Amino acid sequence: MDVLKPDRSKAGPPERPEYFSGPVRLHNLRRPDAPGTAELIGVFFDRGARTIPHIHEADQVLYFVEGEGIVATERERRVLRAGEIAVIPGGIWHWHGATKASAMCHVSIKAVGPTDWSVEKKNWVDY
């Protein structure tokens, strides 16, 4: 059994900073290689920071642990706060990050597998 907790002091810059807009730090809580296993990453977003649009093959769960953030798809944009959970179905274009007013941390939970970061930035508008 693994017992995990995101820790800002253990977070570092992303390996691919071009996948983000604004300052973001990652705490890799669980990064297995085997297909079908769960990857967990604590993601700390400064105010206004966010991911660029992307698509995962499998569902992604975002558990918000502090602050206030946004999860957006082509059809909706939702503000979430600490204690709330978003589930983005696999194959759905989306982005997520902090609001302009609040820094935020969420835990990203998804199956090991590729992410398509090359999708169009449609609906990628200022918020």
Image (tube, rainbow, N blue to C red):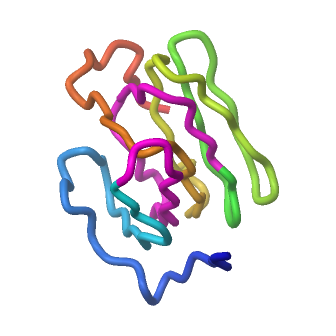
Q: Quadrant of residue 51?
A: top left
Taking depth in this image into account, of 108 and 78 the one nearest to the observer is: 108
- Would residue 122 be counted in the magenta stretch? no
Q: Percent position (x, y) of residue 11?
A: 40, 78
The residue shown at (55%, 27%) is 72
The residue shown at (49%, 18%) is 92
Q: Percent position (x, y) of residue 34?
A: 38, 52
Residue at the bottom extreme of this rendering: 9
Q: Is residue 102 left or right of residue 126?
A: right
Q: Percent position (x, y) of residue 53?
A: 36, 29
Q: Which residues are magenta?
A: 34-62
Q: Is residue 111 left or right of residue 117?
A: right
The residue shown at (52%, 66%) is 42
Q: Quadrant of residue 89?
A: top right
Residue at the right extreme of this rendering: 83
Whether 73 is drawn above or below 56: the answer is: above
**Image quadrant containing the N terminus:** bottom right
Q: Is residue 47 left or right of residue 77?
A: left
Q: Percent position (x, y) of residue 14?
A: 26, 63
Whether 52 is drawn above or below 30: the answer is: above
- Would residue 53 be counted in the magenta stretch? yes
Taking depth in this image into account, of 27 and 99 the one nearest to the observer is: 27
Count the numbered circles shown: 0
The residue shown at (41%, 45%) is 112
